[in-house]
Amino acid sequence: MNNLLLHPLARPLLFGLSLMPFLWLFLQAATDGLGANPQEALIRSTGDWALRFMCITLAVTPLRVMAGWSAVARWRRMLGLFAFFYASVHLLSYAVFDMGLDAAEMVQDIIKRPFILVGTLTFLLLLPLAATSLNRAVRWLGARRWQRLHRLVYGAALTMLLHFFWMRAGKSDFAEVAAYAALVAFLLGWRAWRALRQPA
């Protein structure tokens, strides 16, 4: 597996696969294939993909440690940036289609609806992570401060999951929420268990 991950074509292939959901949504939107409420479908789908890429990103370290796939670590940054990309498209779709880019109305909506507030908080947590994803940011901040900053990803995963739960709660749709909650609990719980096992 490590040899496959180190193949020269692995990076463009992973990039293309990660971009495919966006291209598919764009094609469906252009051909009226998103159903009776295309705006809602686009907002919901991009949010779902942001959560999926968040889970995939968090799964990199367990895969590296438990499966011995050391080369998978080189893809963590790209996968994390795709989580931010889909979260950005999700937020932009909400701002354009639901709010008509009316900033005052968006502020009122954030105050009025807790799940919108939590979604906004999630984006604000992801923003500094994306902004400091380049190697020069590591050199500028220093490795230790950079690592501390990037622990915000754990908080972002939890707030993203809460946003997803509140959104689905209005439709009494909890099966998918439970699956993601179990996955996030495992990925974060594994990290906590591993940290506790390490000597002080």
Image (cartoon, rainbow, N blue to C red):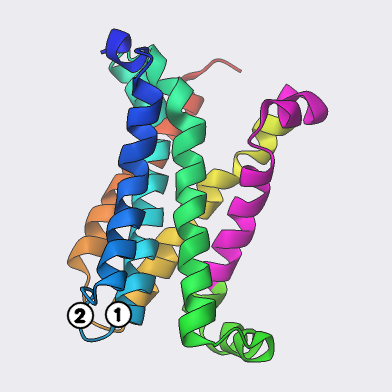
Query: Would residue 98 be counted in the magenta stretch?
Result: no
Q: Position of residue 44 (x, y in %)?
A: 34, 71
The amino acid on which the numbered mark 2 sits, given as a three-letter code, is: Gly
Residues marked 1 and 2 touching at CB (< 8 Å): yes
Which label was assigned to residue 38? Answer: 1
Q: Residue furthest front?
A: 31
User: Does residue 181 appear anywhere in the picture?
Assistant: no
* Residue appearing at x 67%, y 85% in the figure: 103
Q: Tell me: residue 104, above or below residue 189.
A: below
User: Does residue 74 appear anywhere in the picture?
Assistant: yes
Question: Chief secondary structure of the magenta span?
Answer: helix
Secondary structure beneath disc 1?
helix
Q: Is residue 116 left or right of residue 151?
A: left
Secondary structure beneath disc 2?
loop
Which quadrant holds the C terminus?
Answer: top right
Q: Nearer the viewer, residue 197 or 128?
A: 128
The amino acid on which the numbered mark 1 sits, given as a three-letter code, is: Pro
Q: Tell me: residue 113, above or below residue 152.
A: below
Q: Position of residue 31 (x, y in %)?
A: 24, 72
Q: Position of residue 125 (x, y in %)?
A: 62, 55
Q: Which residues are magenta?
A: 118-144
Q: Tell me: residue 193, above or below residue 19.
A: above
Query: Across the whole image, how many numbered discs are drawn on residues?
Result: 2
Q: What is the CA distance from the residue labelled 1 to the residue labelled 2?
A: 6 Å
Q: Nearer the viewer, residue 136 or 174?
A: 136
Which quadrant holds the N terminus?
Answer: top left
Q: Position of residue 47 (x, y in %)?
A: 39, 64
Query: Would residue 123 be counted in the magenta stretch?
Result: yes
In this figure, which residue is indicated by the disc labeled 2?
35
Q: Is residue 141 left or right of residue 134?
A: right
